[in-house]
Image (tube, helix red, strand yellow):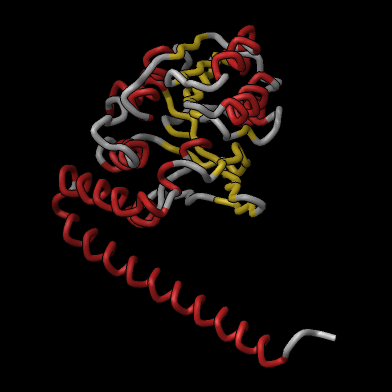
Amino acid sequence: MGLDDLKISIITISYNDAAGLGETIRSVIAQTYKNIEYIVIDGGSSDHSKDIITKYETGIAYWVSERDKGIFNAMNKGIKAASGTYLLFINSGDLLMDEHVIQDVADMGLKEELVYGNQMIIDGALRTEWIPDTELTFSTFFKTSIPHQSTFIKRTLFDTVGLYNEDYTIISDWAFFLIAVSKHGCSYRHVDRFIALFNKDGISSDPVNYPTLAKERLDIFEQYFPFFYKDYERFAVMEREMQKIAYFRKARYFVKKMIKAAKLGPSR
């Protein structure tokens, strides 16, 4: 099998984000790698998302626009529709790093069940590099995870682990990776290549949803890792306290700067 013979399914989930969806679709269909099966799952948007999809329909293998039961239900629809050896989720508003990235990763060889790269996080005008751990440990999943938009998932891994848990609203991708690595011992490899630009507008990035995120993570540890549950709960409390301290230190620093500036008066 030649490198271009490996089919890669790219799945985009979207809801009422026509502008972001258009950018995402263009970044996928611009890829130089030819054996891509592109799937778009729209949640029955009321904006002109459907018009965007039909505009680029020749570059899309399968699409649907219908109401769903949440993001992970939509992602599971994409998985069921996919026939590629590997799956990659690039959701509406996210972009592939450049037009050569899929070809470059394919050239590196895709063998492991999880192949993940680096990710650029976009937060307004700010860009932050996320270079994940090359060795995945408990600490990896306590602190964060591996970047979903930059991870190629072997299709058969969903047969082993199961689809995304639709009972959770935020952390099912994190839970999938955690269970795949720690419970099933799946093979994985980090490639030192930026794969995607992640737009930090999603539900898991909104501070309003942090309590839900923390609760769902605790539920996963209680259900699958009861031996570590108390440790995780204690570490989570410590982490929240450290974040509070860091926040107040930063706030105090800015207040001092403002007071100093006020004392000096306007510059001449």
Q: Residue furthest bottom?
A: 263
Q: Residue furthest right?
A: 268
Q: Nearer the viewer, residue 225 or 12?
A: 12
Q: How many marks?
A: 0
Place residue 95 in its image quadrant: top right
Residue 70 percent across, percent down from the top left: 34, 28
Is residue 215 placed above or below 236 in the rendered structure?
above
State the residue at coordinates (16%, 43%): 223
State the residue at coordinates (65%, 14%): 34
* Residue 123 visible from this viewpoint: yes
Is residue 200 placed above or below 36 in the rendered structure?
below
Residue 234 percent across, percent down from the top left: 22, 65
State the residue at coordinates (57%, 35%): 94
Q: Nearer the viewer, residue 134 or 32?
A: 32
* Residue 2 visible from this viewpoint: no
Q: Nearer the viewer, residue 147 or 183?
A: 147
Image quarter where the N terminus lies is top right
Residue 12 percent across, percent down from the top left: 51, 24
Place residue 98 in its image quadrant: top right
State the residue at coordinates (67%, 52%): 125
Residue 197 percent across, percent down from the top left: 60, 40
